[in-house]
Image: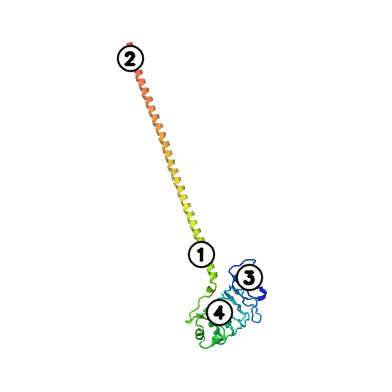
Amino acid sequence: MRKSELGPQSCHVSSSRRPSNCALDQIVVRELVLDNCKSNDGKIEGLTAEFVNLEFLSLINVGLISVSNLPKLPKLKKLELSDNRICGGLDMLAEKLPNLTHLNLSGNKLKDISTLEPLKKLECLKSLDLFNCEVTNLNDYRESVFKLLPQLTYLDGYDREDREAPDSDAEVDGVDEEEDDEEGEDEDKEEDEDGEEEEFDDEEDDDEDEDVEGEEDEDEVSGEEEEFGHDGEVDEDDEDEDEDEDEDEEEEESGKGEKRKRETDDEGEDD
């Protein structure tokens, strides 16, 4: 499919992977937006059954007058056809889009409730939008549509009890959300692992700090022991020196005593 064949003024393709240099037929396309493209006699050329994995298709304001030329898209869940010129022929939708859950026909030429009867065959249809269609001006419009299409949950964004519908994009983009959730879980795991590593590193740092403090305490104790030991040796040496001095003094006194005794004896002999 070439871009020129679609003649798009606004073209958007969303796929599960986006390789840089790759042909379109090698990409699994899940979403295709061709809003404001120029249709050829109410037909979109190039939109074929090759888009077998398509889940979301938007053809807003492309000038469609019929849905008969839509390809068979068995996985399509949401179809946007607002602001076209469709006035009937909806029976082809059930045949080609059997799993359709959301259909937007707002701003088309639908006038009677009977034109919606073919939608009964869309057993999976949960949401239908008909804003700005003439059919919405009929008496008991909402009651009639809900009665005709019992499988419907929401009509024009509200259920039978006038409760507003939640955002339907979440259902259509379920695959993308699952991928985002998986990526988020992986990121959370990585963050948890990083946090555990940081805690482990902090514990190691604390252990190292404790070891360093312990070594410093041991060094201080060892230093005090060395100083104490050195002082002890000095004291012992001082005591030894004091004892030697005392012995020398005693010897000197003994020698002096003996000398005096000898002198006394010598004086006696002389007498």
The image shows residue 228 at horizontal and vertical percentages of 41, 38
Q: Residues within 10 Å of mark 1 (few under 14, many from 20)?
A: few
Relative side of 38 to 132, left or right: right
The image shows residue 203 at horizontal and vertical percentages of 46, 53
- N-terminal of the pair, mark 2 or mark 3, is 3
User: For the residues marked 4 and 3, what is the alpha-carbon distance in whole angstroms?
Assistant: 26 Å
Q: Residue at x 35, y 19 (%)?
A: 258
- N-terminal of the pair, mark 4 or mark 1, is 4
User: For the residues marked 4 and 1, what is the alpha-carbon distance in whole angstroms?
Assistant: 33 Å
User: For the residues marked 2 and 4, what is the alpha-carbon distance in whole angstroms?
Assistant: 152 Å
Q: Residue at x 54, y 70 (%)?
A: 175
Q: Which residue is identified by label 4?
A: 103
Q: Which residue is identified by label 3?
A: 25
Type of residue at label 4?
Answer: Leu
Label 1 element class: helix
- N-terminal of the pair, mark 4 or mark 3, is 3
User: For the residues marked 1 and 3, what is the alpha-carbon distance in whole angstroms?
Assistant: 31 Å
Type of residue at label 3?
Answer: Asp
Label 4 element class: strand
Q: Which residue is identified by label 1?
A: 185
Label 3 element class: helix
Q: Which residue is identified by label 2?
A: 265
Q: Nearer the viewer, mark 2 or mark 3?
A: 3
Quarter of the image where one finds residue 2: bottom right
